[in-house]
Image (spheres, rainbow, N blue to C red):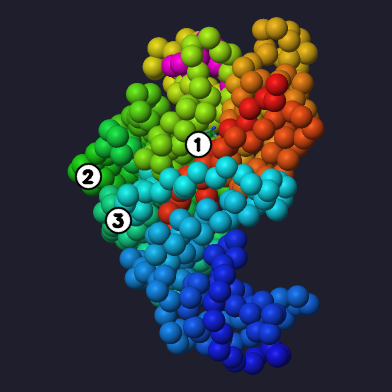
Amino acid sequence: MKKEDTLELKIEDMGVSGEGIGKVDGFPLFVKDAVIGDYVLVKIMKLKKNYGYARLLDILIPSENRAEPLCKVHRQCGGCQIQALKYEEQLRFKERKVENNIKRIGGFSQPLMQPIIGMEEPYYYRNKAQFPVGTDRDGKIITGFYAGRTHDIIPNRHCVLGAACNEEILNVIIAFMEAEQITAYNETTATGLVRHVLIRKSFSTGQIMVCIVINGRTLPMQEKLISALKQIEGMTSLSLSFNEDMTNAIMGEQAVTIWGEDVIIDCIDEIKYQISPLSFFQVNSVQTEKMYRVAMEYAGLTGRETVWDLYCGIGTISLFLAQKAKKVYGIEIIPQAIADAKKNAALNNITNVEFYAGKAEEILPDKFAQDPQQYAAEVVVLDPPRKGCDEALLNTILQMQPAKIVYVSCDSATLARDLKILCGEHTYELQAVQPVDMFPQTVHVETVCLLTRME
Ligand code: SAH
């Protein structure tokens, strides 16, 4: 077997990034866009010592697991990876991914896996979308999504993961740019004005927020855009964000409202959250509610407990748990998010929460050393970013010895690594592993775990 060879292959497995895997005499080949069960014709692109990459040339016999993707550009676009797989099979893939990590990296031989919580309607679920704006070879303004691992814009105003209103909003903005001769940003030359369009929609209240990110300080003829956009049902907030740097960051440091309100309101269960253009908020509200209910059930609160919510963002989990706890403390590294968390507590008349801005691995040990009585908790909730928790933080939790730890994770590999530390020698026991499908059509999966202290 050598580079450029073409051969036929049965796809028998899927890699963590959604690629199909087939074997030739035991030697694995990764094939993007092939799914388990396909019989395919491929061309070998790259060979390494223990595996290789091949390009899909033709699907000779399609797998029974294939679904007809709703999106025409799903193969080029970097947003979805597994749209061509039936939703049921996507769920099985995610369950296997979590279970394998917990077993292999965590060293748990029989983790108590719960069946994944999927979506009834696994499309049009995202409450936030960011569309880059650019120009094609003919000078036409385009918007869509970046192709996987590049900054080439694949034109697409109708993303099947996003809210249905996105397309109409983009049509209005692009028509306005064309009519007023407003330029799109060019990343290579750092010229042109409009960089990105951010759209957020609250599915609970119907409110829509649009923020236009510009390479400059003013948007010429903005009144015309305002009068066109405010016709759209649900529009309540329009802002500009200024980003004049050559950077991969999408948003500028601030957003300035040019029409309507500064925030929109979204609800998860009974709790209301104010969301500004720059706030972090879970992108799938329907699944977030289900996930928080699991976290709440695992926490098993009676009203007497003190709870730490580490990596709390804008306090979403903290406020949710505060309804049934004596006191909730939250820690989050981004000061702006903590400011939002405090506003959200006030908005909901929740007074038994306290928020700290800073690193969880610094603030928790500090507070616990200061007053081990006051700051000891019965329940600790963790929801770290992909890289997982800092070991200093895990060590403090092991000293504090809460009765329960609820670990919410968006990366089951780092989750498994951290669980191994927490469930070391006669410390904690892993009681349940609950995967939740927050991002249908993509390879990402959330997991909630319950750990209880050993007596
Ligand atoms: N629990 C929240 C947010 C989880 S996302 C929710 O459900 O909405 C993870 C959060 O951890 C992000 O808001 C990120 O800013 C924050 N973060 C990252 N590193 C951190 C650290 N070292 N200490 C505290 N927070 C951190």
Give the residue type at disc 3: Glu
Residue position marked by numbered label 1 in the rendering: 280
Instruction: Report the span colored magenta.
Output: 322-330
Depth order, front residue of 167/439? 439
Depth order, front residue of 80/129? 80
Q: Which mark is residue 167?
A: 3
Depth order, front residue of 397/210? 397
Q: Nearer the viewer, mark 2 or mark 1?
A: 1
Give the residue type at disc 1: Phe
Residue position marked by numbered label 2 in the rendering: 232
Residue 26 in the image: above or below residue 413: below
Residue at 44% in and 62% down: 89
Separation (CA) of disc 1 from disc 3: 23 Å
Q: Earlier in the sequence, mark 2 or mark 1?
A: 2
Q: Secondary structure at mark 2?
A: loop
Judge from the rendering whether residue 28 lies leftward or rightward of residue 286; answer left or right.
Answer: right
